[in-house]
Image: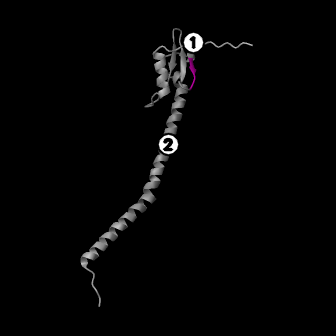
Amino acid sequence: MIETIDPLMLLWILLIGIIIGLVITLAFVYRVAVAPLRKKIKELQAEKQSQSTLYGLISEQFAPFMKYYPFNPENFRFIGTPIDGIQFEKDKVVFVEIKTHKSRLTPLQNHIKNLVKNKKVEWFEFKITK
């Protein structure tokens, strides 16, 4: 005696098979296509950040020689960190931080800026004796 399968049961089995097939296909597509693309995007973002940093470092070195720099570049002394340099004028000393594009002051640079603005700057002379 051969039993027949209920058509509704066949429909459910077919539907479950389709759903399982879709899940397996999506997992495969993610693993083969999406995951490598995400990795490549992260690599490109890191490379772009590295290039931006390098551009900023180079710009800091040459900024005092640009025609729109407001001081005499011969009186600029590059420090590098935590601020870019000091500009020595006849009537004042200016702490200079050069920024490119959207870069902002670091917390340490902000702290130094506040110290200067609040006149918390001193002169210290260190003598070496025998």
Q: Is residue 45 left or right of residue 126?
A: left
Asked whether residue 12 is drawn in magenta, I would say no
Q: Position of residue 51 (x, y in %)?
A: 51, 38
**Image point 51% across, 24% down: which residue?**
63
Look at the picture and state if 95 lies above or below 3.
Answer: above
Q: Which image quarter is the C terminus in?
A: top right
**Image point 37% across, 63% down: which residue?**
23
Which of the 4 image quarters holds residue 14? bottom left
Amino acid under disc 2? Ala
Comparing 107 with 22, the one in front is: 107
Q: Which residue is mark 2?
A: 46
Q: Position of residue 103 (x, y in %)?
A: 45, 31
Of the numbered discs 1 and 2, the one sitting upstream in the chain is 2
Query: Can residue 68 be seen in this snapshot?
Result: no
Query: Can residue 35 be seen in this snapshot?
Result: yes
Residue sitting farthest toward the right? 130
Q: Which residue is mark 1?
A: 123
